[in-house]
Amino acid sequence: MADRPVLPVHIGEFRAASDPCTLAVYGLGSCVALVLFDPEARAGGLAHVLLPGPRPAADPPSALPAKYATEALDALVPALEALGGRRGRLRAALAGGARLFQAAEEVDSNIGPRNAAAVKARLEESGIPLAAEELGGTQGRTVLLHLPDLLLEVRTLRGGRITLPLRS
């Protein structure tokens, strides 16, 4: 996997691919990495969700289609369908949603858990099963989706690492 291109997915962005590559979110804290994949098409995508949503009227749609949990799924599904994925075969995995801040008056210390809950609710509304999750905690993560192998690698910023095969 070392010879594959690594394609970063920044806050509010998403990418989908089926060619050999690695989609990556670095330094994920309270944000949530939404992974969608079709095991038969061996296609996958990654969205970097910043906020639970819905999008406030003061924040018009922008170049960040995955900024809100309420919109990220709707941006990512068509991208996977364009690669041969089928909505009925899609599965999901989630990582992130950490609680990085101790309760401070000016900081919403629950934003990570709220992001995770919002993405899960949107998946449930859409009928897309959740195959794997690595959520919560108090430390940041790096998330790597290796394609077309459908391996999800989650590294914590303090040295932990898990690899989840996304086959079902």
Image (cartoon, rainbow, N blue to C red):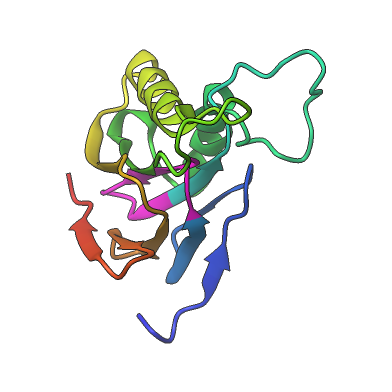
Spot the residue most to the bottom.
Answer: 3
Queried whether the magenta region covers residue 39, the answer comes back as: yes
Compare residues 136 and 20 and report the one nearer the observer.
Answer: 136
In the rendered structure, which segment of residues is drawn in magenta?
Answer: 28-44
- Residue depicted at 44% across the width and 24% down the height: 114
Q: Is residue 164 left or right of residue 87?
A: left
- Residue depicted at 29% across the width and 58% down the height: 150
Picture layout, residue 146 above or below residue 112:
below
Picture layout, residue 19 above or below residue 126:
below
Compare residues 110 and 72 and report the one nearer the observer.
Answer: 110
Q: Position of residue 11 (x, y in %)?
A: 62, 47
Spot the residue most to the front.
Answer: 104
Q: Position of residue 95 (x, y in %)?
A: 35, 45
User: Residue 33's quadrant in the figure?
Assistant: top left
- Residue depicted at 28% across the width and 65% down the height: 149
Quadrant of the image for the N terminus? bottom left
Q: Position of residue 141 (x, y in %)?
A: 40, 57
Picture layout, residue 36 above or below residue 68:
below
- Residue depicted at 59% across the width and 28% down the height: 68
Q: Is residue 97 left or right of residue 91?
A: right
So how many labels did they put on this image? Answer: 0
Q: Position of residue 36 (x, y in %)?
A: 39, 42
Quadrant of the image for the C terminus? top left
